[in-house]
Amino acid sequence: GAVVSQHPSRVICKSGTSVKIECRSLDFQATTMFWYRQFPKKSLMLMATSNEGSKATYEQGVEKDKFLINHASLTLSTLTVTSAHPEDSSFYICSATNSRKDTGELFFGEGSRLTVL
Amino acid sequence: QQQVKQSPQSLIVQKGGISIINCAYENTAFDYFPWYQQFPGKGPALLIAIRPDVSEKKEGRFTISFNKSAKQFSLHIMDSQPGDSATYFCAASIINTDKLIFGTGTRLQVFP
């Protein structure tokens, strides 16, 4: 079946540094990918919609300069948390849908746990 | 309008019992209703999904019941097993947008 891969699965960084998280669709093309954030024991909150070849669309309240999204190809989207602070510590999850199928099914990555010290 | 309300927040079921999780929505434009299962430290995995043109869909031990007029849908897990212990999220989207709105989640614990 379709697989979405995220890397790294865990990252620890110092406050003030930037961290990049990759999301790849391994066996299908994805013109659109989504980035979610999940706090412990909470639901997934959509942060932004990543569109291949164009600017990402951010949800209300999400700082686009803080969370940089790049969707350079049909199989790769990246999320960069810039100047990270402890409050950015969270579980970040991407998802993608197969552009060629009109099923609406979203495939999720395994998530990336960011800890900012 | 964009919210999906989910209940209960947590659920404890004995092995072999039926687990029932409920969700309700307001936006009548939603036309795709999936359920996701999430284990700790992992991403959500699609369990089963339904479109509003049917009232029920069954896949193995998992059944979605959908009530369009009440704007409610529920997940039933028959013969619940300890391996089903996880957090379950309902979600809704307008299919052409692929933009999922998640419920608040239900933590299911199945005891042997």
Image (tube, coloured by chain):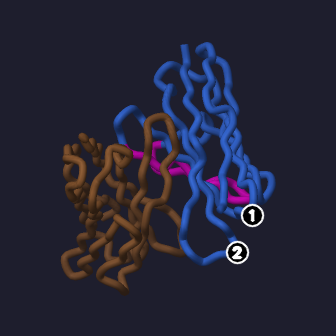
Chain colours: A blue, B brown
Rendering coords of residue B103 (x, y %): 33, 54
According to the image, label 1 marks what residue? Answer: A29
Residues at discs 2 and 1 in contact (Cβ within 8 Å): yes
Left or right: where does residue A28 sit relative to residue A9? right
Can residue A57 be seen here? The reply is no
- Residue A73 covered by magenta stretch: no
Rendering coords of residue B105 (x, y %): 32, 48
What amino acid is labelled 1 in the image?
A: Gln
Nearest the viewer among A108 and B13 is B13
Task: Note whether B92 is above or below A7 in the view shown.
Answer: below
Rendering coords of residue A24 (x, y %): 72, 49
According to the image, label 2 marks what residue? Answer: A100
Can residue A99 be seen here? The reply is yes
Q: Residue at x 35, y 65 (%)?
A: B62
Q: Which residues are magenta?
A: A43-61
Nearest the viewer among A62 and A37 is A37
- Residue A49 covered by magenta stretch: yes
Distance between the alpha carbons at the discs numbered 2 and 1: 8 Å
